[in-house]
Image (cartoon, grey):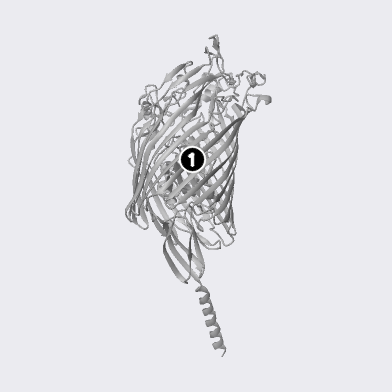
Amino acid sequence: MMKRRLLFLAMLVVALTTNVMAQVTKVRGQVVDDETNEPLIGVAVMVQGTSTGTVTDYDGYFTLSVDREKSILIKYVGYKDEVRKITRTGSVNLGVIKLKADAIALADVTITSQVAVARKTPVAVSTIDPVLIEEKLGTQEFPEILKSTPGVYVTKGAGGYGDSKINMRGFQSANVAVMVNGIPMNDMEWGGVYWSNWTVLSSVSRTVQTQRGIGASKVSSPSVGGTMNMITSAADSKRGGQVEYGMGNDGYQRIGFSVSTGLNENGWAVTAMGAKVWGDGYIQGTDFVDYNYFLNITKRIGDSHQISFTGFGAKQEHYQRSNYDGLTIEGWQEVKKYMGDGNEYRYNPTFGYDKNGQRRSSSFNHYHKPQFSINHVWDIDVNTSWSTSLYLSIGDGGGYSGKNTSAYSGAWYGSNNGILNTQFRKDDGTFAYDEIQEVNATSDSGSQMVMTDSKNNHKWYGLLSTFTQKPTDNIEYYVGVDARYYIGTHTNKIVDLYDGDYYVDNYYRSRVDAANNYKANDPTWVNEKLTVGDIVYRDYDSHILQGGVFGQVEYSLDKLNTFLAGSINETSQWRYDRFYYDKAHAESDKVNKTGWTLKGGANYNIDAHHNVFANVGYISRAPFFSGGVFLSSTSSNMVNKDAVNEEIFSLELGYGYKSRFFDAHVNVYHTDWKNKTMARSIDLQDGDRATLNMTGVNATHEGIELDFIAKPTKWLNITGMLSVGDWRWTDDPTGYFYNSAGQPIKNAAGEVASGILAPDHAKMTLRMKDIKVGGSAQTTAALGAKFKVNRDFNLGIDCNFEGRNYADFEVSSNDIIVNGEKTYEQPWRIPSAWTFDGFANYTFKIGDLRSTITGNITNIFNQEYIADAYDGSDHDWKTAYRVYYGFGRTASVKLKVQF
């Protein structure tokens, strides 16, 4: 009897357990774009009303356990939400789920940034997903992933780690807005970006979107040439992680990890990443080490609120080849005697050793610039949201800068105007640091040459807040606030006397301005014996305070989508100089400028395949701190009285075609850029300096761009692009001379004033109308193919072309003619070049762990080509200087194991 009861109880337990387990459904599916049928990666798939969920993998697939009678919510940036109710138990395959494009972003940090939507946002846009980054980046710099994008030109600069440069539509990096999750990253003083500070982005970017021209960014002061917006991993990351190890040419190694908790049932999610990258460098003597990291902590509070903390950065140091170390073409051939045939372009003129055999360099960079942000998103209702980001960027570091007495002027440079500097040169071509030590040790007046660390520390505080509402089915608008305060501290601290006893900084401490504000009259400064730790050359703070508002209204009706956007901002800039001025005069005047933008556009979807768009914009932008508001930002509080806002007008028209097998986009653009700031300084006979401030520096950038992707079969994707630009200077600007006190240089009697003859306000004209804008290839093209051999094995090849690349040119002291003019001729046209890159990846299992091995080869055929050059006196290849060749063949392999 007892046995029967026990058997009955056991059967009851099994029945109850089976019934409970039967309520749980294992749901599978694949999420794709509604129009292109492309798999969508990183889509958030959650049990509706909870924080339980997952994300889609690289092929758009997901698996999620769901209770019966529950619904799953599918959310992705730039797409409409999709809800599917689960009514069955066991295993359910939802098949292919197509998401339709929508302008409302996923409720996380990306809501602070504009995500352009295909066939809706009327701008020229390109989007790169993590798969492409994973497949093609290899050991390249992060911006190089965009080199097959229309209108984009990327070079490695002088070739040091993280020293690459990016131009868009002929505009240099200072005019290309770089954002991470919508937060601006460009330097507040001059607008540029040092990519060595942001190497972490290659590991954590979920999406990279480029908008060319005047984009639709949610900031009060947008870009001129284009916008790069990197969206990082956040709360929707899949639970799990990965470890990876990579290696490449010239000692390149990378080891890293990432881990994510995914969203737990309490609404918490944590994603962390760390990596170390190191190597010898492709260029001689450019070894580097880089520690990069990323952390995101997110808390979802109910269905309405989300708070997240994001911090990331890269602590790095790398030896460099200076921007002034480029040689002439004949000069590069001459250094074959040092490097051997085929390696001459790797030569580094400042690489060398001291008397003890210790490695030395006058080109060394070390910097750490972490950024931290706290983001709050409030989904007020289904049509209303409010997003706010508070952020802080802290920069700490600098780069070596050699200083010297007048007897050794220019001796620290590896080359002078493209000619190899042989003043301190060993027979093997290395820089003779031991000879500098000998000069200093035997000098009876202290060190003649010393090394300083040019420190450029800063703190940058910012607030971005955006209110978005969709009051009707046809209208959506947003308004926002963009506030920033930046303080940069700039010093040059002596770090090495090179065997001397002290250093006397006579040259930089002997100037006296018109108001006698310099400290040179202080007897404690005259012939002061300086040592390691003392400051020379400069010691000042730059202050930039900017605040503005922005807004946009969007109207959609059936096939038509239009928008009108505008912004206004106030910028206040001033300078505090501890080096040249006493306390009473240390702070400069504040320079206040008001900028504004107005832009609008429309997209019309003719049918399911064809669309056309147009946009027009106008920007009035305050001049930059460096070289704009302050003509000599290193040594004077002199305000540029002629500084005016830069004025930019842009017009763009485009057409798009989309189908299941073929997508193509073509657009034409025209941009007028007026009042570009240009200033140059020269030394005068009395030891003062004159500054030539140019006005009326205007240019026109126009062109046509085409890109396409074809999918003739399931196993083949073909991509291509063509970009043809016409970028030229359009006027003959005139400049006026000022002394170091900011006073016009003039003398009505025609006598010598401040060392130059000036019968009236001294001036100069540059004849540069119709001269090509240099420094960027005006014709670029690309063609690529990706072969999906099977589900686990892919390989691909890309061909890139660059042509009509005119050498850059600058107004140097040799060009300055007081009360005269300088006529420029067309700069030298750099020879065109083709390069080929290849990749392959294979996915397999190590135990139960998904693993991928990826190999990359860049410049497969070791093509020799010139990437950068400055125009010489005869505008030909013989006189071109600061010439830099592109890298030859490089290769890498990486193993990634996911868990």
Residue that extends furthest to the right in the rendered view of this protein: 584
Q: Quadrant of the N terminus?
A: bottom right
The structure residue drawn at horizontal position 39% and vertical position 55%, both measured from the top left corner, is 35
Determine whether 608 is above or below 90 in the image: above
x and y percentages locating residue 808 in the rendered image: 42, 29
Q: Is residue 102 left or right of residue 791?
A: right
Determine whether 857 is above or below 85 in the image: above
x and y percentages locating residue 626 in the rendered image: 54, 30
Residue that extends furthest to the bottom in the rendered view of this protein: 1
Q: Which image quadrant for residue 59? A: bottom left
Q: Secondary structure at mark 1?
A: strand
Amino acid bearing label 1: Lys
Asked whether 608 or 527 is in front, the reply is 608
Local crowd at mark 1 within 10 Å, few (<14), some, or many (≥20)?
Answer: many
Name the residue beneath numbered marker 1: 599
The structure residue drawn at horizontal position 40% and vertical position 22%, both measured from the top left corner, is 824
Asked whether 26 or 494 is in front, the reply is 26
